[in-house]
Image (cartoon, helix red, strand yellow):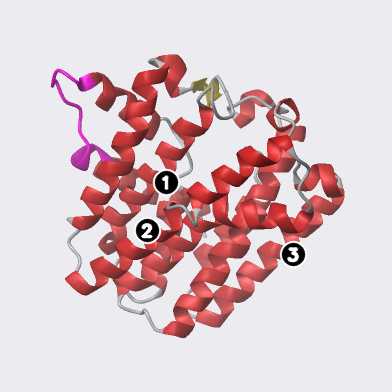
């Protein structure tokens, strides 16, 4: 299959829908909307929306049924990146090859634009054209995985680890919340809106998101050390600058990659449990393991 064509098709669908649901505006407070759209439409692989829509298709639904939830999830992911780049967090000046939101606009506008994306995401999710019972369940997955016991908790742990040296178990728990939680949400919501929300399927979907998320974050650790900064689109060696313990600092590059490969294989095993036409998700999983940005 032509994976690039699949990814580009989904990406175009998501970005077209973003422009419909969160358009430009000439209101007096447009600076917040401009800043939010600047980051939301500043490239990116759209991996979380792609996974959600592919899981919807895998579970018997039309992928566009999940489209509004996919947009909502991407808005939540983008808000987290805006805040993550702020001086009080990782203090990064570049994101996807362009100035971070607070550099392109200002710190206060960037902060508010992140808040706006988070809030608007739930407005979009609440109004998605999905049956009421599916919508409620999907929103529950979205909020729980983005909230204090999911991504927010992971970000808090990440900051606290700058002041201490976590072991691999603590680091894995942080990665599960910071990165894997939104991928668990993507896979799970795809199943829910397709109408295949039995316990066994959702368990396998969560297993996929969990293992893919850990592998994804470990590859991020590796790229922070090895990648070309222009290709990566953001500063490298930021973990070292922020005194962060990562899988690379604990295990070294070679073993860290071996662990990421094992986790990717576990994600593929989860797809086998669900069954059906998993080719695209197989290709995406392998692509994320071997990416260079």
Please state the horizontal and vertical placement of residue 289, each as a whole percent of the image.
67, 53
- According to the picture, the residue beneath numbered tag 1 turns out to be 8
> Crowding near pointer 3: few (<14 within 10 Å), some, many (20+)?
some
- Residue 156 against residue 131 in the figure, above or below: above
Compared across the picture, whether 213 is left or right of 79 comes to right
Please state the horizontal and vertical placement of residue 276, each as a whole percent of the image.
47, 79
* Observer-nearest of 279 and 261: 261
**Mark before the other along the chain sequence, 2 or 1:** 1
The residue depicted at 44 percent of the width and 46 percent of the height is 46
* Observer-nearest of 192 and 264: 192
Say what secondary structure mark 1 lies in.
helix
Say what secondary structure mark 3 lies in.
helix
Please state the horizontal and vertical placement of residue 98, each as a whole percent of the image.
49, 21
- Residue 6 against residue 40 in the figure, above or below: below
Closer to viewer: mark 1 or mark 3: 3
Say whether residue 287 is magenta. Answer: no
Closer to viewer: mark 2 or mark 3: 2
* Label drawn at residue 142: 2
Q: Quadrant of the C terminus?
A: top right
**Mark before the other along the chain sequence, 1 or 3:** 1
**Disc 1 vs disc 3: Cβ atoms closer than 8 Å?**
no
Please state the horizontal and vertical placement of residue 157, each as a whole percent of the image.
61, 46
Q: Which residues are magenta?
A: 18-30
* Label drawn at residue 87: none
Residue 77 visible at all: yes
**Disc 2 vs disc 3: Cβ atoms closer than 8 Å?**
no
In the image, farthest residue toward the left: 27
- According to the picture, the residue beneath numbered tag 3 turns out to be 262
Cα distance between the residues tagged 2 and 1: 24 Å
Cα distance between the residues tagged 1 and 3: 28 Å
């Amino acid at each position: 299959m032509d994976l690039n064509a699949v990814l580009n098709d989904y990406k175009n669908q998501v970005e077209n829908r973003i422009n419909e649901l969160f358009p430009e505006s000439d209101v007096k407070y447009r600076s917040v909307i401009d800043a939010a759209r600047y980051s939301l439409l500043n490239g990116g692989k759209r991996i979380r929306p792609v996974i959600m829509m592919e899981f919807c298709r895998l579970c018997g639904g039309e992928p566009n049924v999940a489209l509004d939830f996919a947009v909502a999830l991407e808005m939540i992911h983008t808000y987290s990146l805006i805040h993550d780049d702020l001086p009080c967090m990782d203090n990064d000046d570049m994101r996807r090859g362009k100035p971070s939101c607070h550099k392109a606009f200002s710190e206060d506008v960037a902060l508010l634009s992140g808040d706006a994306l988070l809030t608007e995401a739930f407005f979009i999710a609440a109004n998605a054209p999905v049956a009421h019972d599916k919508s409620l369940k999907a929103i529950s997955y979205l909020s729980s995985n983005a909230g204090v016991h999911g991504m927010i908790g992971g970000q808090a742990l990440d900051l606290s680890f700058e002041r201490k040296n976590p072991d691999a178990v603590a680091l894995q728990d942080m990665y599960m919340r910071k990165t894997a939680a939104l991928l668990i949400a993507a896979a799970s919501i795809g199943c829910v809106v397709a109408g295949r929300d039995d316990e066994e399927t959702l368990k396998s979907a969560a297993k996929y998101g969990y293992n893919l998320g850990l592998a994804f974050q470990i590859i991020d650790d590796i790229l922070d050390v090895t990648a070309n900064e222009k290709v990566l689109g953001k500063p490298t060696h930021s973990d070292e600058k922020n005194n962060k313990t990562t899988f690379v600092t604990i295990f070294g590059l070679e073993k860290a990659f071996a662990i990421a490969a094992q986790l990717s294989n576990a994600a593929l095993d989860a797809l086998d449990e669900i069954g059906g036409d998993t080719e695209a998700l197989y290709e995406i999983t392998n692509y994320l393991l071997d990416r260079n940005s």
